[in-house]
Amino acid sequence: MQALKTIRTAMWLDYQIMANWTRPIIFFTYNIAKPVGSSLLLIAMYYVVTGRVVGSAALSFLFVGNAFYMILAQVMMSLGWVVHDDREHYQTLKYIYISPSSYYVYLMGRAAMRFLMALFPAFFLLLLGLLIPIPYDFNYPLLAFTLLFGWLFMVASGMLLNSVNLLTARHGGAIGEAFAGVFYLFSGVVFPVSMLPAPLQVVAMYFPSTYWFSLVRRSVLGVEVDGIMKNYTINQCVLLLAITTGMFIAMSIALYLTMDHLARKRGTVEMITTY
């Protein structure tokens, strides 16, 4: 019960931090504008290369993958600053540390709100896809399940990122972008995993995001066109997503405990890097 209360409070706090500068309607418009603009640019690049937009399976693969990657990218890039904001901008990290709530659970709540806020641009892009048009074939129960597990693995990934930032200076933005870029490369976002060199294909199979994006395409488009991922059934993808997500959660807890111990020992909980 205490953990749920902490998560709920952290989610409320995260929204207040993100949106306190304006009215909700303006904030949500701002929140949607950048991802939509990036996706439209990607479509324009696709048109320049291929000379067409309508009626392409490759475009459907690219559009849906990019729309849901925006969730992952926004979560990773914004979470890169959470620890630094608490520690150096607001200088509240030490007070959160001595509160009855677990800082790990608190960070889970912050990550959860970032995920929820990133859903709005993704759904708006899906609506935009009706104008292209993208041949949707929704499997709503599968999509709901996929989003739930997406939240779990993104929270775990965010905790890996936050754990690293407990010992770093103000490089959270760069670290967050690097994390997001790794997922972009290995997860079959805009090009199939089958296009990667053989050694990197093996690496990609250990990322929960690889199976997550495959399930996203199956739940939104009804098909999987990736030459490797289509060899996996939906049940196999679900099982592998659950296993790899569990691995990421275990790694995030282990890394957090290690980094937390080192941060306390080295005194970086109160570190201020004013440059």
Image (spheres, helix red, strand yellow):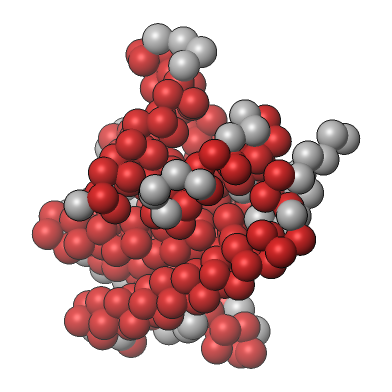
Tell me: residue 83, above or below residue 234. above
Task: Give the image quarter of residue 242.
Answer: bottom left
Tell me: residue 23, above or below residue 142. above
Residue 158 lies, in percent from the top left, at: 51, 57
Which of 165/77 is in front? Answer: 165
Residue 224 lies, in percent from the top left, at: 32, 71
Which of 224/243 is in front? Answer: 243
The residue located at (45%, 44%) in the rendering is 99
Instruction: Indicate the quadrant containing the C terminus: top left, top right, bottom left or bottom right.
Output: top right
Query: Is residue 162 visible to us here?
Result: yes
Query: Is residue 77 visible to us here?
Result: no
Residue 129 lies, in percent from the top left, at: 33, 40
Q: Is residue 189 left or right of residue 212?
A: right
The residue located at (46%, 16%) in the rendering is 20
Tell me: residue 239, above or below residue 55. below
The total number of labels drawn is 0
Task: Give the image quarter of residue 14.
Answer: top left
Which of 48/156 is in front? Answer: 156
Q: Is residue 71 left or right of residue 263?
A: left
Q: Residue reaching furthest left?
A: 141
Residue 139 lies, in percent from the top left, at: 15, 59
Q: Residue reaching furthest top?
A: 23
Q: Is residue 169 left or right of residue 139?
A: right
Q: Is residue 139 left or right of residue 27?
A: left
Which of 51/106 is in front? Answer: 106
Tell me: residue 275, above or below residue 142. above
